[in-house]
Image (spheres, helix red, strand yellow):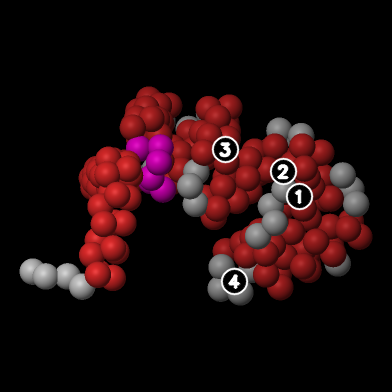
Amino acid sequence: MAYDLEEQEQLDEFRAWWNKNGKLVTRLVIAAVVVYGGWQGYQSWMNSKATAASTAYQTLVSTSLLDVDSKKAEQISKEAEAIEKDYSMTPYAGRAALFAAHALHEAKQSEAAEKQLRWALAEAKEPAIKHMAAIEIAGLQIERNALDDAKKTLAAIDDKGFDGIKNALLGDIYMANKQEKEAKEAYNKALSGLDPEGKLFYLTQQKLDALG
């Protein structure tokens, strides 16, 4: 193919540039392909992890929490810990920790339950799971009369979707401290944020009515 003078000059310039930079360009292209391939591989790996985590989690939560004794609770906790270890990058790890905490609490193993909840609070990938863990930690703190700690735990929850249950627990803290006025205010706030058809709404209303 014949080139005119201008095209030939451009071609010569490109050849000179390629001779100088071609190897670098090739390396960059290869690197980009490797990175893309690595990303695709990582995505595939994550998908397989998520599938395995989902299966393990579904197996875990199929366990009934009715009449949970210490032995059963400890087994549930071990299975949850395996999910936390093997699938910590998935949302199922935090959910498993919450489920294990419920089982341990049912078996009256509050310290072990709180350990699971604190794992969820620190490591869960879903903000809602973190908030739920904080709510339940505060509940355990109230149970053992660590009221100041419970208030601090609740204060760290900044999701308005949890205001109802948060204020219900604050009301319990004020009641424990014999601060009836503050308890009434907290319970009233709680009612505005709770499901009117829910059990917690009914219990909170009862507490408020008892205060007169």
Residue labelled with disc 3? 122
Residue labelled with disc 4? 195
The mark lying in front, picked from 1 and 4, is: 1
Residue 55, how many percent across, how many down?
24, 45
Res 62 visible = no
Q: Residues within 10 Å of mark 3 (few under 14, many from 20)?
A: few
Residue labelled with disc 2? 153
Res 155 label = 1
Disc 4 element: loop
Q: Amino acid at mark 3?
A: Ala
The mark lying in front, picked from 4 and 3, is: 3
N-terminal-most mark, 4 or 3: 3
Q: Amino acid at mark 1?
A: Ala
What is the C-alpha distance between the residues marked 1 and 4?
Answer: 22 Å
Which residue is depicted at the point 57% across and 64% down? 199
Which residue is depicted at the point 65% across and 60% down? 159
Q: Which residues are magenta?
A: 87-92
Residue 26, how many percent across, how many down?
26, 44
Which residue is depicted at the point 83% across and 50% down? 175
Disc 3 element: helix
- Contact (Cβ within 8 Å) of mark 2 with mark 1: yes
Res 17 visible = yes
